[in-house]
Image (cartoon, helix red, strand yellow):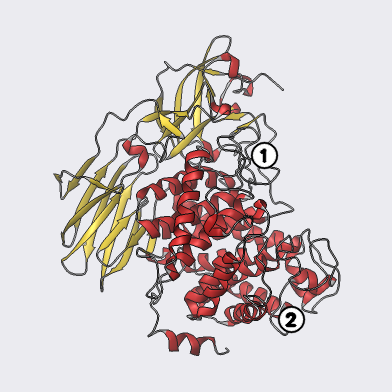
Amino acid sequence: MKTTNNLLFSLIGFFFMISLPGCNDQPVNAGDYTIQPVPFTSVKVTDDFWAPRIKRNHEVTIPIAFEQSEKTGRIKNFKIAGGMEKGKFQSNYPFDDSDVFKIIEGASYSLQTFPDPELETYLDTLISYIELAQENDGYIYTYRTIMGDDSHPWIGTKRWEKTHILSHELYNIGHMYEAAVAHYQATGKSRFLDIAIKSADLVARDFGWGKIETYPGHQEIEIGLVKLYRVTGNRKYLELAKFFLDVRGDGEEYNQAHKKVTEQTVAVGHAVRAAYMYTGMADVAALTNDPGYVNAIDKIWQDIVYKQLYLTGGIGATGGNEGFGEPFNLPNMSAYCETCASIANVFWNYRMFLLHGNAKYYDILERTLYNGLLSGVSLTGDRFFYPNPLESYGQHQRQEWFGCACCPSNVCRFIPSVPGYVYAKTRDRLYVNLYMDNTAKIELDGQIVEVTQQTKYPWDGKVVLTITPDQPSKFKLCLRVPGWAQDEAVPGDLYHYLNNNENEIVLKINGKAKKYSLDDGYIVISRKWGKGDIVELDMPMPVRKVKAHRNIEADRDKVAIQKGPIVFCAEGIDHKNNRVLNLVYDPETTLESEYRSELLNGVQVITGEAKSTKRLPLTLIPYHVWANRGSGEMMVWLPTTKEVSRPLP
C-alpha cells in the first residue's frame, strides 16, 4: 500500500465530501451541491421490479461482460502492454480499455450489495494487469503501448496529439478514475486508486494553461477527475477538470467544442459526449460556484426537454452523428437513442436536481430510467440494445455483445447504483425522489432516520412510508409528486396528455388525510417526527393518451399510451399475423389495464381495440420489455388515421 491512505486520513478533518450514486458517505467541501445524495449503500431495495434486476446484473450481466472482455481480447491487451504476453492489439477500437474499466466500476458497486470473494479476487487480478500496462510515468493506453506511435489514424505521432479528435486517451482514463474510486470505496484497497492518481498526476503535468491546451474529443475525464478530487482532496484534479471544459471553443459541434462551454445554449453533436460534458459542468459548477456554467446547462436542458427529447426519455435522434438533430426532428423508426446517452441523461438530470432542487429534473430522470434506459438490457440480463428506436419492422434485435461495447459495460455500472437515486438530503430536508420497496438508513443532521417504503410502483401509485428517527426530531419530508400525476407529461409542451387525471392525489399522516401544496414539485411536510410515523401518498395512475407537439412531424395524427412513468408499445407477437404497423388506433376505444404476472417476468398490460380492415384487439406492453420474445414489429406512436399507418416494407 502506497501513500494514498496517509493522504486521505490527513484530509479527513478538512473536507466533508458528498457521494454520488455508487459512492459512500464522505467529508463535504464548502463549495458543493446544496442537496446531498444518499448513497446506494444506505438503501436496501426489496421490490419485485428493481431488486431482481440488480441481482441479475451481479449474477449475469457483469460475469458475461467480463467473459466477453476476455474473449474479445480487451483484457489480453493489458497483459500484452504489460509484457506478460506477446502479440498485437487484440480488439476493435483504441477505446476498448474503457469497457474493462466500466465493468470493474460496476463490479465494485455490486460487491457492496453482494459480497463476493471470488469476484473481488478476480478484480485484484485485473488490476494487477492494469498496473503492469501502466508506463513508468503514469501513461496508460494499451493501443499505443502495444502498437506504437502513428499506428492508427486516431493515434497520432506522439502522446496526446489527437486527444481532441478520436484518440480517446483521456476518455479511457476518465473511466479508469471512476472505476478506481469505486473499487477503493468498495474494498478499502488503494492499489487501483494509486494507479489512477499516478495517471492523473501525469495528465496534470502535461495539460493546462501554458502547457498542452486542448480538450478531450470524447468527454468523460472531467467526471472522473472530480471523483478523484472528492476522494483525495487534491484540488489540482478539480482545476484540471475545469480546464478541460474551459479550453473548448475552437473545434467542432460534434464534440461540443464549437463555442466556449459557457456560451453554449443548445444541445448539438454526439449525445453521449454532450451529456457527459453537461454532467461534468454541473459537478464543476457546484464545486467552484460558477454561475456561468449553471446558466449554460440550464439553457441547454430547456432546449433538449422542449425540442429534442423522445417520449421514452431517449436523446440523440440521428445515427450519423449518434446525436442531436434539428429541433423537433424526432423520427421513430430511425431513432438512435443510444443506451449510453440515456445513462448519461440520468447522470446529468440527477445533478441538475442537486443544483436546483426542482422535481422537474427527476421527471426527466424517471422517464428516461423506466423507458429509454431499461430497454437497453434484456430481462435475462444477457442481451443488449445499442440504439433504442420507437418503431421497428423487426430489423432490430437484442445482441449478446457489440464490437463497440460501450452500452453493455455502461449498463453493468449503472444498474447497481439505482438505489442511490431514491433519496437525497440537506441538513433539515429529506427528499423522496423515486418510489420502490426499500429500507434506508439515512444520516440527517447528526442522527439516523430509517425510512421504509412499501409500494407496487411503477405499476401502482400508492406508497406507504414509515419514518423512524433515532429520537423524535423536526425536519422536512419532501415527497416528489411526478409530473404524470399532475397532468404534465413533460416539463414544457413537447408532449401533453389528451385525458386529464380526474382523481385527486391523497396524502395521509398516521391515517389522517392532510391538505398540502406543492413546492417545486414536492409535498413538503414539516413536523416533529417520531418512531413509526406513517405517511401514505396515493397518486392515481390512470391510462393516459399522449399527443406530441405539432412540430414533430413523425408523430402527427398519432397517440402514445402511458401509465404512470411507463410508456407502452404495441408488439407484433401479441397481434394477428405478428403485425402492428398496419393498425389504426381508435381514439374512442376504452383502454383497460391489468397486471399479468406470467408475462415478461410480470408486467402491466393495456388492452383495447384497433382497426385494420376490421376491428381487432389491441395489446400494449411496457416499451422497456419489447424484443424480449424475439424480433418483430413494434411501435410506440399509434396512428389514428389509415394515412399515417405503415404498409409492409
Locate residue 514, reporting x and y percent: 15, 45
Residue 475 appearing in the image: yes
Locate residue 166, reporting x and y percent: 73, 60
Residue at coordinates 63% horizontally, 72% vertically from top-left?
Answer: 122
Q: Is residue 141 left or right of residue 28?
A: right
Taking depth in this image into account, of 563 and 126 the one nearest to the observer is 563
The residue where tag 2 is placed is 135
What amino acid is at disc 1? Gln
Residue at coordinates 48% horizontally, 30% vertically from top-left?
Answer: 549
The quadrant in which residue 493 appears is: top left
Residue 435 appearing in the image: no
Q: What secondary structure is found at the residue carrying circle 1?
A: loop
Q: Is residue 45 left or right of residue 444?
A: right
Q: Residues within 10 Å of mark 1 (few under 14, many from 20)?
A: some
The quadrant in which residue 595 appears is: top left
Q: Residue furthest top?
A: 614
In the picture, the quarter occupied by the N terminus is bottom right
The quadrant in which residue 215 appears is: bottom right
What amino acid is at disc 2? Glu
Q: What secondary structure is found at the residue carrying circle 2?
A: loop
Name the mark on residue 64.
Answer: none
Locate residue 170, reporting x and y percent: 66, 68
Is residue 234 depicted above or below 485 in this figure? Answer: below
The residue where tag 1 is placed is 397
Q: Earlier in the sequence, mark 1 or mark 2?
A: 2
Locate residue 190, reporting x and y percent: 55, 82
Instruction: Tell me how far mark 1 sits from mark 2, CA to CA.
Output: 41 Å
Taking depth in this image into account, of 588 and 461 the one nearest to the observer is 588
Q: Is residue 503 left or right of residue 135?
A: left
Q: Residues within 10 Å of mark 2 (few under 14, many from 20)?
A: some
